[in-house]
Amino acid sequence: MKIISVVGARPNFMKIAPIIKAIEKHNKSIGDSRLAICHLLVHTGQHYDVNMSKLFFEDLGIPEPEIYLGVGSGSHAEQTARIMVEFEKVLLREKPDLVIVVGDVNSTIACALTAVKLHVPVAHVEAGLRSFDRTMPEEINRILTDAISDYLFITEKSAEANLIREGRSKEKIHFVGNVMIDTLLKNREKADKSQILPALNLRPKNYAVLTLHRPSNVDIKETFKRILEALEDIQKHVKVIYPIHPRSRNRLEEFGFSKRFDFLSINCQPSTLNGFVMIDPLGYLDFLKLMSESKFVLTDSGGMQEETTILGIPCISLRKNTERPITVEEGTNIVVGTNKDKIVGESLKIINGNKKEGRIPKFWDGKAAERIVDILLTQKYELNNLG
């Protein structure tokens, strides 16, 4: 069985890492090499720099991709088209039995669509998640990828209901758990050794962590301004650490906010002179340590809503919706939007000791990737016998 897995952006790396490990575990456990899985990792290059890509590969112990497409940035149409053109060449040359795509980035839909047109089966990991907000590019990517995939691996039961409602066959849907959590649980002990807290002069539970990168938040001047004004109030009560995404840093300069908000450490160097500290992007292990020891998290990231649920860290989502409702229903997540008063209000509740408690969702146990590989092998075996 020959499988090609695709990554394109940083969240993909955490999702693909445990699948690679599960494939390696299978290959070591068998006595007959003919039953081994031949696996190739393709990096589209949708996002690529040392801090946001290479460092993650090193932290997660993922081998360097066998194939790097190097598509770079561009509009959604340009980027998707370049990925499709380059990935088609890979498929025609390698002739895989299956393509695995993860998440909801442009690489996900581009590679899934290219594979399906060449009659190569597709497995979508993290299928069925819906924000019901079609202004989000990721929502379009999710819906379209699920519509053409042969295997739909879901993290929570709401995803199954979404897929059934959209007409997907129940036989294609497999509730396996969350591969992001596989990665977190596997690396938690290693992350505990990180020296990021003393490097930033921080004490556990004495600071908050911010991530902010979505175009709907940082590309719209008034929205970005509201969030920063809320943070200006919050940093008076607790230090806020912001590993800043390159996109957000560019918008700070473009909108003139680096001058307006003089408390910001705009040179991306840690500072002990104010309550808002911007730093360069971190590797996976350093960031996991930073998040694990925080008092709470403010974020517009879907993945961090899941990670904070496992860690028991209160999470304030700076979005009007979430495609991961289980993090609200069972986890520690609260969705507040971008209203300044709501952001500040929820933050002060946590600062004053009134935090939301959560529980661990079903199958978020570190074994999702093993379930995925077992299902793929079982169905491949059954198809071979039928043939």
Image (cartoon, rainbow, N blue to C red):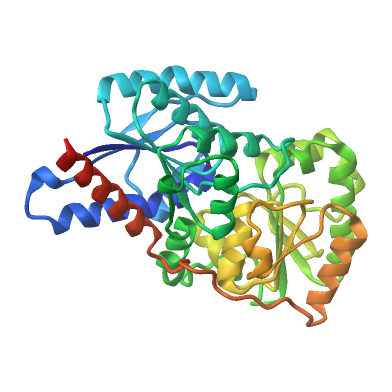
Q: Residue at x 41, y 26 (%)?
A: 116
x, y percent for residue 160: 53, 52
State which quarter of the image contains the C terminus.
top left
Q: Taking 273 as reference, is 291 left or right?
A: left
Q: Identify the image quadrant of residue 342.
A: bottom right
- Image vertical order of residue 43 relative to residue 316, above or below: above
Which one is nearer the viewer's eye here, 342 or 1? 1
Whether residue 336 is situated above or below residue 110 in the rendered picture: below
Q: Which residue appears farthest toward the bottom when viewing the image?
A: 353
Q: Provide residue 147's location: percent of width, then percent of height.
A: 52, 34
- Residue at 75% of width from left, 63% of height from top? 240
Outermost residue, left direction?
32
Relative depth, front residue between 277 and 364: 364
Which image quarter: residue 205?
Answer: bottom right
Residue 124 placement, left or right of 325: left
Please name whichever residue, 385 or 290, is drawn nearer the observer in this view of the structure.
Answer: 385
Q: Is residue 201 visible?
A: no
Q: Quadrant of the N terminus?
A: top left
Q: Position of residue 22 (x, y in %)?
A: 30, 55
Q: Locate residue 257: give its quadrant.
A: top right
Q: Is residue 313 above or below residue 326?
A: below
Q: Which residue appears at 15% of the width and 42% of the height?
A: 385
